[in-house]
Every structure is written in structure tokens, then in C-alpha cells.
Amino acid sequence: MIEVIGLHKQFAENILYSDYNVQFIAPKLCIEAPNGQGKTTLLMILAELETRQSGQVLFAGNTLSEPHKQVAIASDCISLPDFLTARQLIDLVINTLGCSWPNSLISGFNFNEFLNTRFDALSSGNQKKCQLILALMRNAPYLLLDEPSAALDQTSIQYLLNLLDEYLIDKPDGQIIITCHEPAPFIEHGFECMPL
């Protein structure tokens, strides 16, 4: 379970969260809210990639000492070095976190032919696939996916749903939290919806 306590986050004069408290209890959860309501910012705060003015985030009742090892996130708002190829980005994660080469993910997303393409030259769909591969290959207990089905083809969406069906099998305390505008396929695969 992930718990947010007393979160305050604002950008200049725009207060996004003020003394915000929430418990994310379901193992697989889809957060729903209109654009601009802070879904992506919340995921970034959970992953410790966005600062907060105040508040606390607890994972199974504790703060994480090494969130980069225990929380994996895929989001368009994470700045990847777009001059690197997809292969180089994958190698970077492997060298940094000690992951294995993600053969099955690359094949499952039909991504082999794009490994030597610079990230900035990939289509939006293939950028999304690359982001998902980089997050999923880490096999972290907490997986945060920001609009994971956006720009994906139907075959890749189905592959992702099948992956998420199995993801928590060896992670009894793990959790998957996604944001999504079209939650129906995820609900069919056991996700609970929660308004922000």
C-alpha cells in the first residue's frame, strides 16, 4: 500500500495539492482525473522525481531508502537523453541498476528493429514502448505507468495488459498504479478505478 500524507505541491501560484491525504490500497489501481489535475505530478512525486513543498509518502508504512531501485516509472514527462539510441538507453539502465537485457519485452513490443534508432527519432508509439521497456525491465515492486496505452497499437496494448496480469505474482507487497483516460481494458484486467 502506498500512502500520501499531508502533501502540498504548487507551481508558482498554482496550488495542485494542499494537505492532500490518500491511501492507494488496491494492488492494481487506475487513477482517473481530467487533464491538468495533477495525475502525472503525483506519480512523479511517488517516484521521488518531483519535489514537494511538504508531505510524506509511505510504501507499506515506510519511507524508501532507495526509491530508484524500488519504484519504476514510465512517463512522457521524464526527460530521457534523446540523442541516445534505444539500445543505449537500455544499456544505461542495465549498467546503473544491474538489470538483465530485456529480450522478451523487446520482442513482445515488436521493438527489435528500433533498437538502433535515436530516441528523438522514434514515433510517439515507439517512444512509449521504449519508456515501458525501461520501466518494466527493472522488475521493481512498485510500478507507476503514466498513460501507458497512449499512442500504442492494439497488439502492444494487449501485450502490456498480459504483462500486467503476471507482474505482481512474485511481488506480494507490490503495486501497479496507472493513469489512464480509457480505463475499460485495464478494468477488465483487474484494475480498480479511483478518482483523483
Image (cartoon, rainbow, N blue to C red):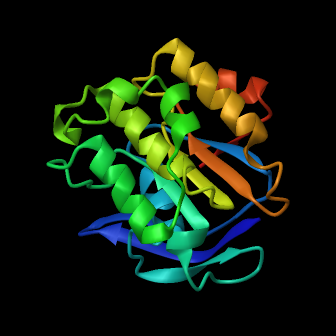
Q: In which quarter of the image is residue 1?
A: bottom right
x, y percentage for residue 159?
Answer: 61, 24
Decide which of 55, 160 is in the foreground and name it: 160
Decide which of 19, 145 is in the foreground and name it: 145
Q: In which quarter of the image is residue 71?
A: bottom right
Left or right of 196 in this view: 95: left
- Rendered position, 62 above or below 88: below
Tell which residue pokes out farthest to the top in this image.
154
Decide which of 15, 112 is in the foreground and name it: 112
**Going 38% across and 69% down the picture, which residue do you hit?**
50
- Rendered position, 63 above or below 179: below
**Going 83% across and 48% down the picture, which residue do you hit?**
169
Residue 175 seen from this side = yes
Left or right of 42 in this view: 96: left
Residue 19 seen from this side = no
Left or right of 22 in this view: 118: left
**Going 54% across and 66% down the picture, which residue do you hit?**
46
x, y percentage for residue 7?
Answer: 53, 74
x, y percentage for residue 99?
Answer: 53, 60
Decide which of 59, 13 is in the foreground and name it: 59
Q: Quadrant of residue 58?
A: bottom right
Q: Count the numbered circles shown.
A: 0
x, y percentage for residue 179?
Answer: 55, 41
